[in-house]
Image (spheres, rainbow, N blue to C red):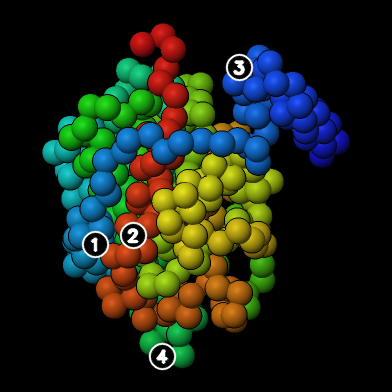
Amino acid sequence: MKKLLAIHGVALLLILGFVSCDKTTQTGKVEGLDEIRNQNPENQEFTLQPAPQFNGDSAYFFIQKQVEFGPRVPNTSAHKACGNYLVQVLKDMGATVIEQDFIATAFSGTKLESKNIIAQFNPSQKERILLGAHWDSRPFADQDTDNQDHPIDGANDGASGVGVLLEIMRILQSDSTAPVGVDIILFDSEDYGQPEGMDYQPDTWCLGAQHWAKNLHQPNYSPKYGILLDMVGAKNAKFYKEGISLEYAPNVVTKVWKTGSKLGYENFFVEQSAGAITDDHFYVNRLARIPMIDIIQHDPNSTSYFGSYWHTHNDNMEVIDKATLKAVGQTVLQVIYNEKPDKAS
Ligand code: AHN
Ligand code: ZN
C-alpha cells in the first residue's frame, strides 16, 4: 500500500510538472488529475461546503439533562429513566428510533439489563454515515483516591458524546439540505469493564458495541464509515489520531482532522498519532467490519492516559466546556455536509 501511494505521489508530481511547463494546458483541466488526487487523501484539496451552525449551548444542555438523572449504571432506575429520555428526545426530533434491548454479562457475572439506541435520520437515503457514543456511565470511581466504590457522574465519559450527537440530530432534522443519511447509535454498557489489578479477562468493556456488532439492527447494514465520540467535552481537550482508527479507517481520520483544522480547531485536533485504545469502535471495525474512527481525548502527560478526571468523581459538569463541544460538533457536522449525495436520489 505504501508503495502504491509513493507511485501515485510520483505520478502526481510528474503531471503537475507537466502542467506547469506546458503553457497550452495551463488553464485547461487535466483529465484524470482529480481522480489521482482523490485516491490519496493526503493530496486532497477540498472546500468546506455550506453547513449549519452547531450549537454548543444546546449540546451542553443535553449533557446536563443526562447527568441530572444520576449515574447511568445498568440495572438502576436512573439508567432506565435516562434511556427512556434519550429515546423520547430522538423521537420528538422526528428521527426513526430502534431500541435494541439485551442482557449483557459483566466481568463479575452480573447480568446487565442493557439497551442500545439507534436513531435514523433520513432512513430512505442509501448513502449513510454512522455516528456513535456510549450512554452508560461507570459504576465505580476506580481511578479516584476516595469513594472508589461509588458510581461517577460521567459528564464527560459518556454524556458528552451523547450530547453532541443529540445536537447533531436536532440540526439534521431541522435542515433539509444534508447530503447523506445519518444513523446515530448510543451504545450501552461500555463502561462496566473489569478494573485493573484483577485476573485479566478480555472483552469486558464495550458490551453494547459487541452485542450490536453481532446483531446489526438491519441485515447487511453498511454505512460508508463511522465516527465514535468518547470524552469530547472537557476544557482544552486534545484529540490525537488514535491507533485502531488509523489501522482500520486512516482516510476517515485524515478527513476529520483536516476538516477540524480547516475550521480553525487545530488546537483540539492534534496532527499526531496516539496508541490504540479499546473502545466501541474496535468491535464495530473487527466484528461488524464497518470502518469507524474514535475521537477521544488523550493526555500524554497524564498517568491515566486520558484526562485527570477519568474514572474519578471529578468527571462532573465542571469539566465540560462549550468550546470543546463546539469544536467537535461543528467538525463532525462539516464532515457530513461535505459528503457526496447518493447518485440515485
Ligand atoms: C479502556 O480503558 C480499556 N478503554 C477505554 C475505553 C473507555 C472507557 N472509554 C471510556 N471509558
Ligand atoms: Zn470510562
Mark 2 vs mark 4: in front: 2
Question: What residue is shown with label 4?
Answer: 146
Question: What's the distance in space between the residues labelled 1 and 2, CA to CA?
Answer: 8 Å
- The reply to whether dot 1 and dot 2 touch (C-beta < 8 Å) is yes
Question: What's the distance in space between the residues labelled 2 and 4, CA to CA?
Answer: 29 Å
- Say what amino acid the circle numbered 2 marks: Leu
Left or right, 52 with respect to 109, comes to left
Which mark, residue 60? 1
User: The residue tagged with tag 4: helix, strand or loop?
Assistant: loop
Question: What residue is shown with label 2?
Answer: 325
Which percent across, then down, holds residue 142?
48, 79
| Figure quadrant of residue 9 | top right
Which percent across, then down, holds residue 8?
78, 30
Is residue 162 visible in the rendered structure shown here? Answer: no
| Figure quadrant of residue 37 | top right
* Label 2 C-beta lies within 8 Å of the nearest ligand 1 atom: no
Q: Is residue 3 above or below residue 114?
A: above
| Observer-nearest of 33 and 139 | 33
Question: What's the distance in space between the residues labelled 2 and 3, CA to CA?
Answer: 43 Å
Q: Is residue 134 above or below residue 255?
A: below
Q: Is residue 343 above or below residue 307?
A: above
Which percent across, then down, holds residue 73?
34, 63
* Label 3 C-beta lies within 8 Å of the nearest ligand 1 atom: no
Is residue 150 visible in the rendered structure shown here? Answer: yes
Q: Point out the tag, 3 or 1, that comes first from the N-terminus.
A: 3
Question: What residue is shown with label 3?
Answer: 28
